[in-house]
Image: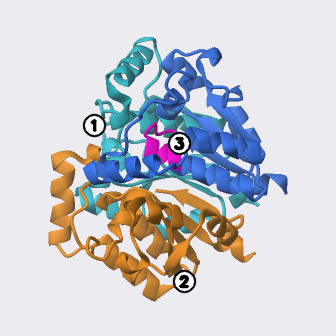
Chain colours: A blue, B cyan, C orange
């Protein structure tokens, strides 16, 4: 079944470490030819604003100063940002990124405020209909 | 298969933003006629105590003051709380909310301490048996 | 299908409460005879370093001082640590724990730095191939 193959990621968290974990999971699935459906909520949606996507979004609290240093060192060594990895994933495979309409209201943003990585806005019903019985991962 | 349709949500986090995301995912699935099984652990369980369910449970750290303001503005404009959305979801469809027995011990609470939204207490084995091969989402 | 039975856990968070929730979900699945595949990323991987696995890794921010006290009281009453629960889960059933190769690079650690609970290092592609269409839970 097509929908068993589909991987649905609900992105909620807006820190760079979780967004990077999400981007790596997206790119990995896309590289294997699996369609990926990304649904952006809350602080993850905020991070996809076109005037914020390249800013520093911080890390999970448990990262601490040592985690911060590790992340900075890897970026300095040439690791792409999560936004770049998401772009590569879209070039590589079938990756659709949708903003949650309720979170759009919450953050009082318009579709034109979002980075072109985002394909559109949808409600939770549309999300479930696209997802079917495929895997759902909340990040 | 019935259990392919079932959506199981393990709620761990106790902040209002994550609980609201969980309530919206629950209500959306219920509206589509899908059964939802919610399993409450740790700080999410704590938030379902009847004397705390209507309190302010804070937001994820990355919300920041701007996120706080956005959440408060939406509530002031009439958005229901996550607890109200969970209640609506239960009216709408087949939503079962169970407290994790290990987390009950951890927090030293009795079933009578919990809001009536919670249907009972179960162990992790009962959770898996109810879940079958359906989707599991950890929030 | 074998891969419908398999439960895949992506562990990202490195706090003791989330790691304990993950260990309980692992042990519960193993006790039911379900194979479990654990993939360690970021701060969860850091917590599996052999010189850190028995340290205090803190709690999610929303735990607060009351949550801290509850967790400490349960440990004092004899509750096993998450690392002990993971060890029991491996004795009990088919539990494989793999470190994410990208996170190994991020944290600049070698396989010999990891606790013997960790079975090896794999990339995200190997993770997906092992996972198939089974449930994926991100913690």
- In the rendered view, would you say B94 is above or below A119? below
Foreground mark, 3 or 2? Answer: 3
Left of B82 or right of it: where is C128? right
- In the rendered view, would you say C90 is above or below B99? below
Residue on which disc 1 sits: B52
Name the residue: 72% across, 41% down: A90
Of residues B31 and A42, the one drawn nearer to the viewer in this rendering: A42
| CA neighbours of label 2 inside 10 A, class few (<14), some (14 to 19), many (20+) | some
The span from disc 3 to disc 2 (Cα, nearest Å) is 36 Å
Of residues C35 and A27, the one drawn nearer to the viewer in this rendering: A27
Left of C17 or right of it: where is A121? right
Residue range of the region highlighted in magenta in the rendering: A12-20
Residue on which disc 2 sits: C94
Tell me which corner region of the image, top left, top right, bottom left or bottom right, holds residue B94. Answer: top right
Question: Could you tell me if the residues under marks 1 and 2 are in contact, i.e. CB atoms within 8 Å?
Answer: no
Q: Chain of mark 2?
A: C
- In the rendered view, would you say C59 is above or below A51? below
Tell me which corner region of the image, top left, top right, bottom left or bottom right, holds residue B65. Answer: top left
| CA neighbours of label 1 inside 10 A, class few (<14), some (14 to 19), many (20+) | some
Residue C114 % position (x, y): 37, 76
Name the residue: 20% across, 69% down: C75
| Same subunit, tags 3 and 2 | no
Of residues C27 and B108, the one drawn nearer to the viewer in this rendering: C27
Q: Secondary structure at mark 3?
A: loop
Q: Chain of mark 3?
A: A
Q: Residue farthest to the top?
A: B77
- In the rendered view, would you say B77 is above or below B117? above
Residue on which disc 3 sits: A81
């Amino acid at each position: 079944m097509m929908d068993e193959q589909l991987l649905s990621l609900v992105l909620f968290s807006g820190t760079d470490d979780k967004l990077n974990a999400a981007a790596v999971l997206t790119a990995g699935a896309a590289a294997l030819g699996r369609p990926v459906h990304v649904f952006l909520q809350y602080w993850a949606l905020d991070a996809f604003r076109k005037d914020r996507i390249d800013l520093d979004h911080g890390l999970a609290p448990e990262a601490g100063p040592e985690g911060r240093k590790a992340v900075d060192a890897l970026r300095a060594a040439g690791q792409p940002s999560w936004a770049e990895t998401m772009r590569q994933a879209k070039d590589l495979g079938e990756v659709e990124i949708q903003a949650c309409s309720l979170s759009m209201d919450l953050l009082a943003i318009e579709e034109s405020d979002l980075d072109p990585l985002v394909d559109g806005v949808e409600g939770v019903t549309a999300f479930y209909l696209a997802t079917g019985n495929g895997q759902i991962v909340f990040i």
